[in-house]
Amino acid sequence: MKQDMIVILDLGSTENTVLARQIRALGVYSEIHPHDITVEELHALDNVKGVILNGGENRVVNGVPVEIDAALYSCGYPIISVDYPSSQCQKRFSALPTDEELKAFVFDECEAEANWNMPNFIEDQVELIRKQVGDKKVLLALSGGVDSSVVAAMLIKAIGQQLVCVHVNHGLMRKNESESVVEVFRNQLHANLIYVDATERFLGKLEGVADPEQKRKIIGGEFIRVFEEEARKLSGIDFLGQGTIYPDIIESGTKTAKMVKSHHNVGGLPEDLQFELVEPLKQLFKDEVRACGIELGLPAEMVYRQPFPGPGLGVRCLGAITRDRLEAVRESDAILREEFARVGLDKKVWQYFTVVPDFKSVGMRNHARSFEYTVIIRAINTIDAMNASIERIDWDVLQVITDRILAEVKNVNRVCYDMSPKPPATIEFE
């Protein structure tokens, strides 16, 4: 069923997403749109029940205050304003409304129905996907990350074997991740899955490359080439599935806010592939994507997996990648994740991982001098990834993790804990 919607017009607020999530928490769908939306464009949206004019510190652009089209006031929808001067609104708020104030607007004035939930969302998206795709095929780059996995599960539910998933193992995955992707999607969900082991190809291209940006470009560019090669082996594919989510769209910039970062989920596919995009998650925030994945039957360990950079362990094996250090990163990361899960920190800490720098230090092993690598543990908490604080790990837990890494991971004789917040540090090392 179609969900009722409250439209938020961005008039310079830095809290558009906070307000949108506040409304969704009431069980009513909400979307953010630019301030200069026309009456025609507003009426073209499905099931609009009310409009919120959301002003704020960015309302002046190039010295000129942004304004809405005055015709919107007579478009037939209840309208309130937040930190936006308007004498034509029914109610004006100087700051974000409380939940009770929002409830009064959404349910009493707008008469919206609380029908925003995952079963309804999935039902709508399945219908839309089938309508868009028809009897054609969809190609999806399945990394095993949360977004691509949930998109795959959604598309499998909608079109089954018309979906072709390509999973490229670039040799920089975490321990057992590629095996997990194959097990879940090929063996459990019976997806049409193409698995490409390109480990040697990627590590060959990366040999001797120490600069982080150059590594990223090589990994991203090579992935595109491998994906393109697999795509060209196929025929009759007109659509490309992408894991675009709502923050990707918002962070790519609005007319009253600077771009946080650009998002290109497939990383610049060749123009001659000529695919039409299928993006069934583009309305969801990250926690909603996870809820969608659980509703679709994906295993919790896949849906709640740690955030993982596109270049994978390539940017956690610092400097020029070597196979012994790459293996040390992979094994130490697996130990960290196991121990965090054992004591419940996996549900408390936003992101945690290990890195191995490109230097050795002297130590003792088997009563003899050793010259081996260092593993650095990083565990941070954040809301928006713009600022991050360090998780204070219990000393006994750190001791167990350290003992296991030193005993089980080859070529490592030292473990350190990174105490640096963001800023001045960043979340990743490279």
Image (cartoon, rainbow, N blue to C red):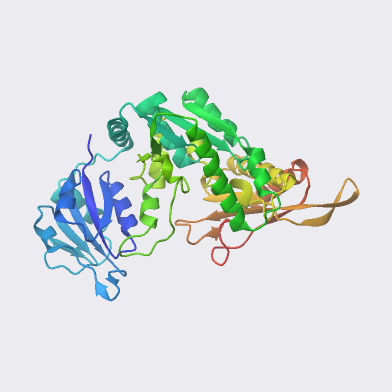
**What is the quadrant of the C terminus in the image?**
bottom right
Left or right side of 397 for 16: left
Q: Image point 15% across, 57% down: which residue?
A: 79
Residue 143 visible at all: no
Q: Report the side of 386 relative to 74 (left or right).
A: right
Nearer to the camera, 275 or 299: 275
Q: Is residue 183 left or right of residue 242?
A: right
Against 122, is 409 above or below?
below
In x, y percent, where is residue 376?
68, 54
Q: Quadrant of residue 287?
A: top left
Residue 293 location (% of width, % of height):
42, 36
Q: On the rendered image, what quadrant is the N terminus found in?
A: top left
Q: Residue at the right extreme?
A: 368
- Relative vertical location of residue 147 with respect to residue 51 in this rendering, above or below: above
The location of residue 143, given as percent across then percent down, is 51, 39
Quadrant hosting residue 133: top left
Q: Is residue 121 above or below residue 429?
A: above
In the image as oriented, which residue stretches furthest toward the front? 272
Q: Looking at the picture, does residue 226 appear above or below residue 89?
A: above
State the residue in front, 209 or 9: 209
Image x and y of residue 42, in percent: 18, 51
Q: Residue at x 50, y 41 (%)?
A: 145
Q: At 23% across and 52% down in the image, what residue appears?
A: 7
Residue 384 visible in the shown view? yes
Residue 73 vs residue 37, the one in the foreground: 37
Q: How many marks?
A: 0
